[in-house]
Image (cartoon, rainbow, N blue to C red):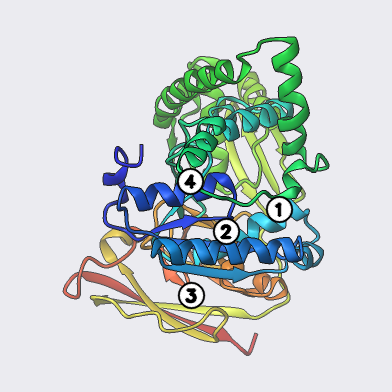
Amino acid sequence: MLQEYGGRIGGRRLIAGISGGADSVALLQAFHALDIPCTAAHLNHQLRGDAADGDEAFVRALAEQLGIPLKVKRVDVGQLARQTGSSIEMAARQARHEFFAEFGDAVIALAHHADDQIETFILKLARGAGPEGLSGMPVFQQLDGLTIFRPLLDLRRPDILRWLETNRTAWREDASNADESFLRNRVRHTVLPMLQNELNPQIGGAILRTMEILRAENEFIDEASGFAVHGTKLDASSTMEQPCAIRRRIIRKWLFQQGAETASFETVDKILKLMAGGKGTSVHELNDRQRVVVEYGVPRFEQDAFRASGPSWRLTTEPSTGWVRDDSRIGDAAAEASVSAEKLDGRALAVRTVQPGDRMAPLGMAGTRKLQDILTDLKIPKMRRPELPVVVCGAEIVWLPGYRIARGWEAAGQSAASVHIKLEQNRTA
């Protein structure tokens, strides 16, 4: 699979996440054996004292032995969990994401394998996921601004271990992998063996086949549901003519495009029932400030403006050519940038503060990212975020001052027609 998908890396820098465990060691050794250039990246979570330091020392020695560049970062994940009020697992995930984001526009190779897929399937099935969740992790994925590459997904873990043993390659065992207070470990050590013994000795292979079926059907549903969503508008009549699976996917897509913070099964079905009623006006509250209003079968998304006690902002625009570089920093009292006049097409720009659930498509990145993730990566304190400005066109975020403009809004060249934007904090407000 490494060679099969090599062309999709497209000459970008390849980063191999390595913990020191068997799977990531096998990944790094495979890159080395195939002469695929990469940089190893190791995050010391500082959760296991001397054992964690031992993992770091092992990784340093392995990278030196293979002649592979290495970047190491140490994060006190326990302290991060206490500061954010999140679980250790979520804090560790946040720390890894921020670490990988430091590599910029790189491809992040992770050592997830087929057994990880099986465990994920069981975890998501227990929580009530649909075909999107049960399809498992893809080989390539755009995830919150990161390009993730999982080249070992077709391999079972026993095969990986046999390969390492055949090649007399050492690895580190993480004692926490046996700790069943972690849900995934409970699935690995208790639930799966029970299913194998009581239901089907080949349950792992059966789950992988099911995931492959769901993955193909999910791709079909996703493609079939795209026609009905056009920006903030939903083709309600066409939506209701579709089979149930397509209707549900259309509503989920539409909700997330409008900036909804969640789109649960219950929420989607409630909105569809209100649309099917087709009479009068009904309101479904998503949370304390987001709602869907359904008028005679046509849904409309509403969101209360975030009211902050921070500064107000003054926005001015003027026709221009080319672009002005945004040299400001997040939260500066003044900033300038340029956007494509063709893209703006005479529409108005506005400025508002950052709101929960905001997403943008940053220039130079694939997909979209939550602003809260961007601001986390930039280490902007939470208490400052509600007063930060964003420039929008309708419901779309065009520019986060001090960071970058959105993909598709850039001027085509220095001779192209553009709109110059100037943003200043209104200190008299």
Q: Quadrant of the N terminus?
A: top left
Label 2 and label 3: CA atoms lie apart by 23 Å
Q: Which residue is mark 4?
A: 26
**Label whose residue precedes the other's in the sequence (1 or 3):** 1
| Residue at 26%, 45% in the rendered image | 7
Three-letter residue code for mark 1:
Met
Q: Can the viewer see residue 398 in this picture?
A: no
Three-letter residue code for mark 4:
Ala
Image position, residue 2 (x, y; %): 35, 42
Q: Nearer the viewer, residue 295 or 322?
A: 322
Residue 243, above or below 31: above
Q: Which residue is mark 2?
A: 97
Label 4 and label 1: CA atoms lie apart by 26 Å
Three-letter residue code for mark 3:
Pro
Secondary structure at numbered mark 2: helix
Which numbered tag is attached to residue 90?
1
